[in-house]
Image: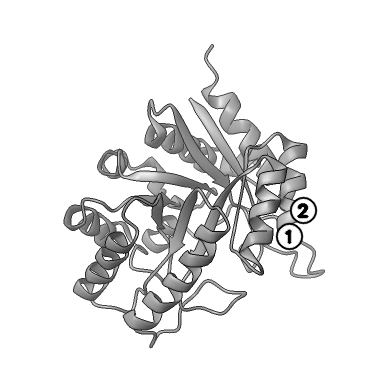
C-alpha cells in the first residue's frame, strides 16, 4: 500500500506555504486545503513544491467556517460549488473533497443535489465528505445515497459518525463492508462516543478507539495501489482546552504527524 499523506491546512492552522513546508519536513506527499486568492499563483506553488494538492470545497458557509446556514437552498450550494470548482481546477487540483449540501434538507432534495454535482464533475476526482451538518451526517442516509447514486464516492471521516451515533463506528464491521469500494479519500481523526476528536490518540484511555480507527482505515483502503489520507486533528472547538487556563490539551501538529507516521508503520510488510 502506497499511502499519499496530506497535511491539512485547517487541522494544522497553516497557510498553504506553511503546509508545504510541513509536508516536506514530515515526509508527507500532499497538502489539503481550500483555495484562497489567485489560482494561477497557487498552481505555481504546487508545481514548484512537488506536492500533490487536494482541494477542499465547502458550500454555502462562511469563508472561515464549515457549517451551512439552516435555510440555505440547493441553488445557493450549487452556485457556490461551481465557483469554487472552477478555482480549484484552474489551480491544478488533482483531487477535490467537498462538504456539499445540508442536513436540513429532505432526503430526496439531498439526493438530487448530489446527483447533479456528480453529473457536473464527470471525469473529475470528486469525493463527498461524511460530515455533520451535511447530507452525509449519519451512516443511514449515507448508505442510502450510495445505493441511489452509483457514481458517489466518499471522503470518509468516521469521527463525525461516532458523535452522531454515540458509538465506536470504526468498530462496526457490517458498516465498513458496505463502504468498501465507495471511499476515495480518508480523513484520519480518532473520534469516540461523545466527541469527534480524542484529545490525544496516543493516550492509554483512547487505545481501543485509536486501534479501531487505524484498522478501519486499513480495511477501507484494502489492496488499492495507493490511497490518499489526511490526518485531520484540528482546532475550531475540536481541540479540548484546560478549563482553568484555556491552554490546549494537545499539540495538533505533533499529533497529525504521529498519525501520518503511524499509518505507514501499521501497514508496512513484516
Q: Residue at x 37, y 64 (%)?
A: 137
Tag 1 residue: 15
- Report the front residue among 33 and 262: 33
- Report the front residue among 48 and 239: 48
Q: Position of residue 7 (x, y in %)?
A: 65, 47
Q: CA distance from mark 1 to mark 2?
A: 5 Å
Labelled disc at residue 181: none
Note whether residue 199 is visible. yes
Q: Residue at x 46, y 56 (%)?
A: 97
Residue 254 placement: quadrant: top right
Left or right of 62 in this view: 50: right
Q: Is residue 165 positioned above or below 154 on the image?
A: below
Tag 2 residue: 18
Q: Check whether the beta carbons of the residues at disc 1 and disc 2 lie within 8 A of each other.
A: yes
Q: Position of residue 142 (x, y in %)?
A: 28, 58
Q: Secondary structure at mark 2?
A: helix
Amino acid at each position: 500500500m502506497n499511502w499519499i499523506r496530506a497535511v491539512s491546512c485547517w487541522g494544522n492552522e497553516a497557510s498553504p506555504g506553511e503546509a508545504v513546508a510541513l509536508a516536506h519536513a514530515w515526509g508527507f506527499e500532499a497538502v489539503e486545503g481550500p483555495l484562497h486568492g489567485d489560482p494561477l499563483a497557487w498552481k505555481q506553488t504546487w508545481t514548484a513544491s512537488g506536492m500533490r494538492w487536494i482541494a477542499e470545497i465547502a458550500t454555502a458557509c462562511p469563508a472561515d467556517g464549515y457549517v451551512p446556514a439552516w435555510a440555505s437552498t440547493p441553488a445557493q450550494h450549487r452556485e457556490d460549488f461551481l465557483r469554487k470548482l472552477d478555482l480549484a481546477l484552474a489551480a491544478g487540483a488533482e483531487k477535490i473533497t467537498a462538504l456539499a449540501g445540508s442536513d436540513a434538507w429532505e432526503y430526496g432534495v439531498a439526493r438530487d443535489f448530489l446527483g447533479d454535482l456528480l453529473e457536473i464533475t464527470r471525469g473529475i476526482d470528486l469525493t463527498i465528505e461524511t460530515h455533520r451538518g451535511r447530507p452525509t451526517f449519519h451512516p443511514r442516509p449515507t448508505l442510502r445515497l450510495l445505493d441511489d447514486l452509483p457514481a458517489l464516492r466518499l471522503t470518509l471521516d468516521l469521527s463525525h459518525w461516532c458523535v452522531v451515533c454515540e458509538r465506536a463506528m470504526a468498530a462496526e464491521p457490517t458498516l465498513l463492508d458496505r463502504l468498501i469500494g465507495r471511499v476515495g479519500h480518508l480523513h484520519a481523526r480518532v473520534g469516540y462516543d461523545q466527541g469527534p476528536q480524542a484529545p490525544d490518540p496516543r493516550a492509554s484511555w483512547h487505545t481501543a478507539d485509536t486501534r479501531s480507527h487505524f484498522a478501519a482505515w486499513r480495511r477501507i483502503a484494502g489492496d488499492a495501489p495507493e490511497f490518499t489520507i489526511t490526518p485531520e486533528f484540528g482546532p475550531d472547538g475540536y481541540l479540548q482546552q484546560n478549563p482553568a487556563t484555556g491552554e490546549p490539551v494537545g499539540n495538533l501538529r505533533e499529533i497529525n504527524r504521529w498519525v501520518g507516521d503511524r499509518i505507514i508503520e501499521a501497514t508496512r510488510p513484516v
